Image: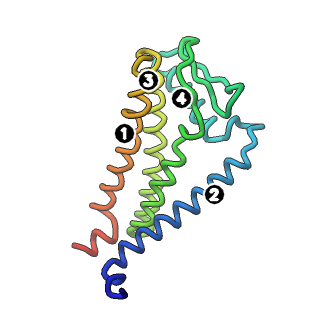
Amino acid sequence: MKALFLKYKSVVKFILTFLTVYFVLTVAYKFYLDFSDGSKYYPDYFTNLVAKQCDVVLHAVGYDARIVPHANESSMKLFINDKFVARVVEGCNSISVIILFISFMIAFAGKFRATLLYIISGSVLIYSVNLLRIVILSIGLYNYPWRREILHTVIFPLIIYGMVFLLWMFWVNRFSKQQKANA
C-alpha cells in the first residue's frame, strides 16, 4: 500500500491541495456573502460592480442600458432599451470561477512569483472575459430572445470554463514545477 501511495504521491498531493484551497476559499466567500447585507451594495459588492460595469460597457457599444435592483430577489435587473433581458445574480460575478482557477494554480504551483503573477493576471482575465460574456449574452438575449436556453446554458458557460481550461493548460505546459520535474 505504501508503494502505491509513493507512486501516486504527486497526484494525491495535487488533489488534497486543490480540495483544501477550494474549500477554504469557498468558505471565505460564503462568509463574505453572509456578511454582505446589501445595505450599501445590493446584492453584494462584486455582483453590484459587475452589473454596473456591464451597464457601462453596453453604453460604450451603443446600447441604451440600465440596471436596477430586483425587488423580489438578490440580483440586479438589466434592461436594454427598456426591455428586461437578464438578471445579474451572485453566480454572474465570476468569483466562484476565479476560486476554482486559483485552487488549481496553487495545487499545480510553480515558482512563487510566477504563480502569484499568473493567479493575478488570470483572475483579471477571467473577470474581464466574464464581464464581456454577460454583455454579449445580454445583447444576444435582446436581439434573439428565442435563443435564451442555448446562449445561457451552453455557449456562454463554454466560453468562461473553456478559457479557464486553456489558462490551466498554458500554465501546466509552460510554468509549473510538475511539468519541469517530468521533463
| Label 3 Cα neighbours within 10 Å, binned few <14 / some 14-19 / many ≥20 | some
Whether 105 is drawn above or below 65: the answer is below
Residue picked out by circle 4: 54
Q: In this view, does 55 lie to the left or right of 10?
A: right
**Considering only order in the chain, which callout, 1 or 3, is on the residue closer to the N terminus?**
3
| Pointer 2 residue | 28
Structural distance between the alpha carbons of marks 2 and 4: 26 Å
Q: Relative to 10, say whether 79 is above or below.
A: above
52 and 92: which one is in front?
A: 92
Residue at image point 57% right, 35% down: 50
Q: Which quadrant is the N terminus positioned in?
A: bottom left
Residues at marks 1 and 2 touching, judged by CB atoms closer than 8 Å: no
In the orientation shown, which residue stands out farthest toward the front? 1
Q: Earlier in the sequence, mark 4 or mark 3?
A: 4
Foreground mark, 4 or 1, reads 1
- Residue 76, position as x, y percentages in the image: 63, 29
Location of residue 14 in the rendering, given as x and y in whole percent from the top left corner: 41, 69
State the residue at coordinates (68%, 36%). Answer: 43
Real-space Cα distance between discs 1 and 2? 26 Å
State how far apart marks 3 and 1 are (Cα): 15 Å
Kindly state the secondary structure of the residue where label 2 is placed.
helix
Q: How crowded is mark 1: few (under 14 residues within 10 Å), some or many (20 or more)?
A: few
As displayed, is residue 98 above or below residue 5? above
Three-letter residue code for mark 2: Ala
Can you see residue 131?
yes
* Numbered mark located on residue 158 in the image: 1
* Residue type highlighted by circle 1: Leu
Which residue matches tag 3?
148
Near-viewer residue (144 or 168): 144
Could you tell me the amino acid type at mark 4?
Cys
